[in-house]
Amino acid sequence: METIEWSDFAKVEIRVGTVVEVLDFPEARKPAYKLKIDFGDEIGIRKSSAQITDIYQKEELVGSQIVAVVNFPVKQIGPVRSECLVTGFHREDGAVVLARPDSEVPDGAKLA
């Protein structure tokens, strides 16, 4: 494992946001959803895609909060311009479990 300096970590904007829309993403190579996430007034709504279809249904994601990196450059993923990186952890079976706060916090709050 590579060691990093505090200044490296401090550059990463990890914020919480509320999922406001979830759509199927049939063009993706691996099953995924297209997400719109509200990060509050300062950042606004960002789009992303996430390979989280193994565990999560679209309906249960809407209104839930997630943790994402919001200061990566935009990345084109097929027809989707991904504007943030939704974070999660791989289980042994390969499914992704979302990183989420365990109680509600304001949209846009930074990881402390």
Image (spheres, helix red, strand yellow):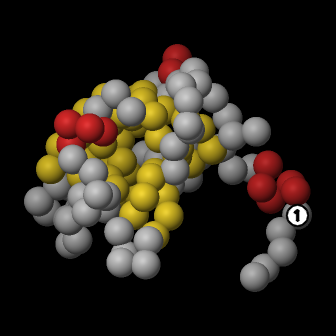
Question: Residue 57, how many percent across, how many down?
Answer: 21, 47
Q: Which residue is mark 1?
A: 5
Query: What type is the residue that disc 1 sits on?
Result: Glu
In the image as oriented, which residue stretches furthest toward the bottom?
A: 1
Residue in the picture at 52% in, 17% down = 41
**On screen, residue 103 above or below 93:** above
- Give the position of the C terminus as an image quadrant: top right
Quarter of the image where one finds residue 23: top left
Residue in the picture at 45% in, 34% down = 65
**On screen, residue 61 above or below 20:** below
Q: Is residue 74 left or right of residue 104?
A: left
Residue in the picture at 25% in, 63% down = 54
Q: Taking the image as drawn, is residue 77 in sight? A: no
Q: Nearer the viewer, residue 35 or 92?
A: 92
Few, some or many C-alpha atoms within 10 Å of disc 1 (few <14, some 14-19, many ≥20)?
few
Residue in the picture at 56% in, 30% down = 103
Q: Nearer the viewer, residue 14 or 76?
A: 14
Numbered disc 1: secondary structure: loop
Question: Residue 34, how many percent across, how many down?
Answer: 25, 48
- Give the position of the N terminus as an image quadrant: bottom right
Q: Taking the image as drawn, is residue 49 in sight? A: yes
Q: Is residue 102 left or right of residue 29?
A: right
**On screen, residue 50 above or below 45:** below
